[in-house]
Amino acid sequence: MSKSNRRQFLRGAAGTTMAIPFLESVVRAKPSAIKPQQRMAIYYVPMGVVRKGFFPGEEETVLPKFQGATTKAIGLQRPVGIQTLQRLTPSQTPLEPLKHKLSFISGLDRTYKQGTDVHAQCGSCFLSSATMESITDSAYPLDRTFDHIVADTISTHTPFSTLTLSCNSHKDNKESIYFDNISWYGTNHVTPSIRDVRQAYQRLFGTKKKGDLRDITDLVLDDARELQKSLNTTDKDKFEEYFDGIRSLELQIERLEAMRAEIETANISIPADSLLPRGQYIRTMGDLMVAALQTGLTNVATLMIGPERWDTPYRFESLFDKPMSHHQMTHKPHQFVEQLLQIDRFYMEQYAYITGKMDAIIEPDGSTLLDNTIFTYGSGLGDGTTHQYNDLPILVAGGSRLGLAQGKHIHVPDETPLANLFLTQAHAFGMEIDSFADSRSTISGMIS
């Protein structure tokens, strides 16, 4: 790998390569002369949300009964327009420290194509939403997804064009690929996602060595010590902070693998991954994603938090005393409403953790990684019980250096396509395109 103004690498023995963040002492350029890269990340949540916890004004809404087909919105009718994001809803409260750096976009819809599974289409088509007429060789309105289209503009010179991560490590693949993938090269051509934390680590840092993950950093320590001699005080602090973060990440991975090995030896009746701590797994994947964006290994990443409709249970640590199936609970909302609200908040806590981590990383010009990243939280269902495809739960964090408005609640007109959101983001990245998928226009007020 060649050096560039964006990417530097440390090499050790046994084929080990470690990417490091921008260091002005190495590049020998003034920080003001280095323009931070533009990045994009997606955080996809399965099974929609409980509307009374996520959407303002719906706290007293009567919970609907389970319905197997898509329905129109059950939510509150809101005036179209832009307001200051003053009070977060219960499911959004983990984002309170960061609400000045995010916007809530409500009212966005997707069109459901009859003849396909509700859950499969809402996940697989979330980043595509192709027009109903444009796809003839698939039952799904599924085309090349937005992450790859953006990567053609902002990730052309990175080692990885895109990074596709999934937090579903279960091996009981009883559902089709449409339930479990949001990134696609094109119709019927899925982007393979990395689901194992060790595999993701080794792919990002290019090691050929097997065994203790700590060996990876040990193998490059001599190079690191030599490099540190030439660093200024600011870069030394940044380097040490980064290296400590990598070691912490290695320890997280080792703990997860040790837990899995111990569970497997117990010969229990449910999959071992059902007993792994879900939050720790998501945060570790999030840490890997942030490290890849920070070091310039990629500028575009997607993180699918869980599969659609999959009934294999997960262990939501700190919430329940046994593994639970998120999907099955959405079929019995009156029985499990409190648990479902807890899961919504749990997933938001992980999103807030990743967002906060991005905001703590300082770029050469004094901005943060989050300021230069459009980080979207979203789900393909507006309500998991009724399977509605309209009024989707969408939050957009970061992007201030790309001109995105922050600290706003933007409610769009009825029947505004979700693709309008992605067209707006494309324009923020400087892409000169008139449309994306079934978009009709950009979202007014989203770019300041």
Image (tube, grey):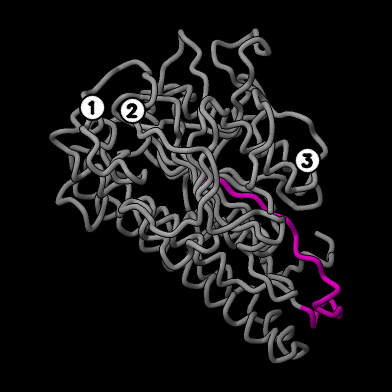
Element class at badge 1 = loop
Q: Which span of residues is magenta-colored?
A: 24-44
Tell me what residue is drawn at x 68 percent, y 65 percent: 19
Sequence-first disc among 2 and 3: 2
Crowd class of label 1 (few under 14; some 14 to 19; many from 20; radius 10 Å): few
Is residue 124 shown above or below 369? above
Element class at badge 2 = loop
Which of the image's four quarters has the N terminus? bottom right
Image position of 341 (left or right of 409): left
Indicate the quadrant where residue 323 lies. top left
**Residue contact at pointers 1 and 2, CB within 8 angstroms:** yes
Percent position of residue 328, x then y: 23, 30
Q: Amino acid at mark 3?
A: Asp
Crowd class of label 3 (few under 14; some 14 to 19; many from 20; radius 10 Å): some
Between circles 1 and 2, the one closer to the viewer is 2
Sequence-first disc among 1 and 2: 1
Q: Amino acid at mark 1?
A: Pro
Numbered circle sitting on residue 152: 3
Which of the image's four quarters has the C terminus? bottom right
The residue tagged 1 is 64
Between circles 1 and 3, the one closer to the viewer is 1
Percent position of residue 213, x then y: 50, 65
